[in-house]
Amino acid sequence: MISEFDLIAKYFARPVSKADLGAGDDCALLRQTTGLQTAISTDMLVSGTHFFPDTDPEELGHKSLAVNLSDLAAMGAAPVAFTLAVAIPTSNEAWIAPFAKGILALADKHQCELIGGDTTRGPLNICITVFGQIPTGQAIRRDAAKVGDDIWVSGTLGDARLALAHMRKELILPENQFLQVLPRMQKPTPRVELGIALRNIAHAALDLSDGLLGDLTHILDASHAGASLNTDAIPISNILQQQDQVWRLQCTLGGGDDYELCFTAPPEKREQVLDAARQAGVPVTCIGKIEQQPGIRLSNAAGPLEHTGISSFDHFASLKK
Ligand code: ADP
Ligand code: MG
């Protein structure tokens, strides 16, 4: 068994360039830059609650950082650094090595430097704090949606929930389809470039981790507004397209773990939104409007959604992993 200090030295002590001091002392030292604010976010992943205990360690490493980078993306912040606190049951290098590989590969991709953390024995638990930078005043907050804004989402929604449905045997997917949607749950892609490109274009934004209805409600509550959504417009994969309407709605409206961005922008900035998406290399789709009347009104080509026989969406909104 490797000792705690050897473990840190071997896997987690890394050279830094964006920070003035990284791991190895009592604190790391972050550099301040005039005109920039520091965006900070923490996410904890607990074994058995946020992931299955036998999850592939490399994918778990990726996901642990990805969900944190996704929060930076949702504010339009550029990643700078992160700290990593882990409780691990045993210092088993066969688990730690791929875990570190998964985390550090994504960190390198976004030039987000590991600057410190804590390592302890205990039930598997991973807690990351990320630090990002953003020009002062340009953060895309939840409380700035305006009546008349378009509501947009990136990528496609619902595949992570569809993969979970298969794993829980709520439905059965053909093996090849399951293998295509599984990475949406296990290896989410934080939309960092899109968030940055949306600075000064989007009014409000957040990342989708708990399902569109519940997450959009956070923007609406903070902005004192309501919304109408066209459920036909919600972008979904070819695989989810093959499911019946109830599952399509359940996965897109109530399904978590997609880590796409949901944002609002004024209609006159539509071309700028589409340019930002092209620049970031991820598609975006307009799915609705911010309105004065509180609440979320759903409709499709056939009319308001209650007319389709699906009346309550509290059910979908409250469906969690
Ligand atoms: P202290 O007792 O002063 O809090 P520790 O013994 O916990 O310090 O950690 C020693 C050094 O190793 C610190 O600089 C800390 O930031 C770093 N460190 C510990 N665990 C990790 C980790 N999982 N990832 C990165 N750095 C770590
Ligand atoms: Mg100390």
Image (cartoon, rainbow, N blue to C red):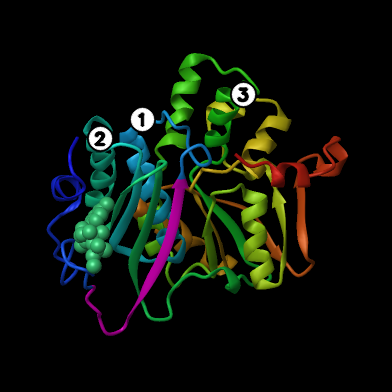
**C-alpha distance separating marks 2 and 1:** 8 Å
- Rendered position, 70 above or below 272: above
Read off the residue under disc 3. Answer: 242
Residue at horizontal 45 percent and vertical 47 percent from the top: 45
User: Tag 1, which secondary structure?
Assistant: loop
Q: Main secondary structure of the magenta part?
A: strand
**C-alpha distance separating marks 3 and 1:** 28 Å
Numbered label attached to residue 98: 2
Mark toward the start of the polypeptide (2 vs 1): 1
Q: Quadrant of residue 144?
A: bottom right
User: Tag 2, which secondary structure?
Assistant: helix
Residue type marked 2:
Pro
Percent position of residue 196, x then y = 37, 63
Q: Quadrant of residue 312?
A: top right
Residue type marked 1:
Asp
Q: Quadrant of residue 297?
A: bottom right
Residue type marked 3:
Gln
Do labels 3 and 2 touch, CB within 8 Å?
no
Do labels 2 and 1 touch, CB within 8 Å?
yes
- Rendered position, 94 above or below 219: above
Nearer to the camera, 241 or 66: 66
Numbered label attached to residue 268: none
- Rendered position, 240 above or below 68: above
Is residue 289 rendered magenta in the image? no
Query: Can residue 111 be spotted in the picture?
Result: no
Mark toward the start of the polypeptide (3 vs 2): 2
Percent position of residue 285, x then y = 55, 49
Read off the residue under disc 1. Answer: 56
Do labels 3 and 1 touch, CB within 8 Å?
no
Residue stretch in magenta? 30-45
Nearer to the camera, 301 or 76: 76
